[in-house]
């Protein structure tokens, strides 16, 4: 058999033709890479986030990759914003078949007793409450329209591991892992599959410590990541697309860890 015969055709890799996908936190990093990957595979993508200019840049990149995309400015910690983002997606494109809940932030890194109430609330309101709000409105639409697939972005810090100074972030992301499994059980009967990915250190600005260069970070990770490198946003996107696709049709309530072996 020739090497050419082993390569999938373009038609075989267009898993999301005629599907409408909403990606929160779509302005950069994992969210942007995921939006581009969905667009490349035939989806119409709506990216949501707080920064209009950065969202527009994602839309341009999706278009350059051959996909279709639009943007909606929304803060996931606001129920009204999330409701409006889902409504805008449906109004523009006629449906919502896949949702990727990626919006999140690291917040202040400090021991728990040194965090202020505002420090705590900032992380939890975005990473956990914001994800719950997204689930709430996405599920409401999908239940009434035949189902869909939802992929939540958790973290290897949380249910899978803990780090000093990351208490608020770990608590919120552990909550995402639990919400994912709970929602999966509650809505699988409505033909909605809910799963999660839990990335470790990924090559985005969030992986850099204060004052750290990319070279500094890479040297640090070489000593703590068995694979000796950061992951790429595209690698996380590939996992998200798998979980959202029919290829994962029997996968429900799974939390896929992508951390180069850190929590192996």
Image: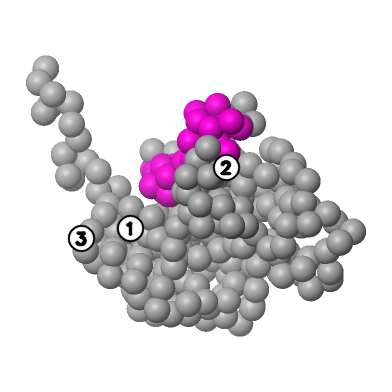
Q: Is residue 73 toward the left or the right of residue 157 in the image?
A: left
- Pinpoint residue 33: horizontal percent, then vertical percent: 38, 55
Numbered label attached to residue 200 = 2
Q: In the picture shown, does residue 119 fall above or below 91?
A: above
Cβ atoms under marks 1 and 2 closer than 8 Å:
no
Instruction: Say whether marks 2 and 3 touch (CB < 8 Å).
Output: no
Residue beneath disc 1: 36
Q: Is residue 257 above or below residue 97?
A: above
Q: In the depicted view, which residue is nearer to us: 116 or 172?
A: 116
| Residue at image coords 50%, 28% | 227
Quarter of the image where the N terminus is located:
top left
- Examine the image and state in which quarter residue 119 appears: bottom right
Q: How many marks?
A: 3
Residue 141, x across and y down, in percent: 52, 68
Q: Nearer the viewer, mark 2 or mark 3?
A: 2
Image side of residue 53 versus residue 165, left or right:
left
Residue 44 appears in which quarter of the rendering? bottom left
- Secondary structure beneath dot 1 equals helix
For residue 144, side relative to residue 36 (left or right): right
């Amino acid at each position: 058999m020739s090497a050419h015969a082993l390569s999938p055709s373009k038609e075989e890799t267009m898993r999301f033709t005629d599907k409408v996908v909403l990606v929160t936190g779509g302005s950069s990093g994992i969210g942007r890479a995921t939006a581009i990957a969905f667009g490349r595979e035939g989806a119409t993508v709506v990216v949501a986030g707080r920064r209009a200019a950065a969202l527009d840049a994602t839309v341009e990149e999706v278009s350059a990759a051959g996909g279709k995309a639009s943007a909606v400015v929304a803060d996931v910690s606001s129920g009204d914003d999330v409701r409006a983002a889902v409504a805008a997606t449906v109004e523009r494109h006629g449906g919502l078949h896949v949702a990727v809940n990626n919006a999140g932030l690291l917040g202040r890194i400090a021991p728990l007793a040194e965090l202020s109430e505002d420090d705590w609330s900032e992380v939890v309101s975005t990473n956990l409450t914001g994800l719950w709000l997204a689930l709430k409105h996405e599920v409401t639409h999908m239940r009434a329209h035949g189902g869909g697939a939802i992929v939540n972005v958790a973290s290897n810090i949380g249910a899978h591991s803990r780090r000093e100074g990351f208490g608020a972030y770990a608590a919120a992301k552990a909550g995402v892992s639990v919400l994912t499994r709970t929602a999966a059980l509650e809505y699988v009967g409505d033909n909605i599959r809910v799963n999660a990915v839990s990335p470790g250190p990924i090559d985005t600005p969030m992986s850099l410590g204060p004052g750290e260069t990319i070279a500094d970070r890479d040297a640090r990770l070489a000593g703590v990541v068995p694979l000796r490198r950061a992951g790429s946003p595209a690698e996380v996107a590939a996992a998200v697309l798998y979980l959202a696709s029919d290829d994962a049709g029997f996968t429900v309530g799974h939390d896929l860890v992508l951390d180069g072996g850190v929590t192996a």
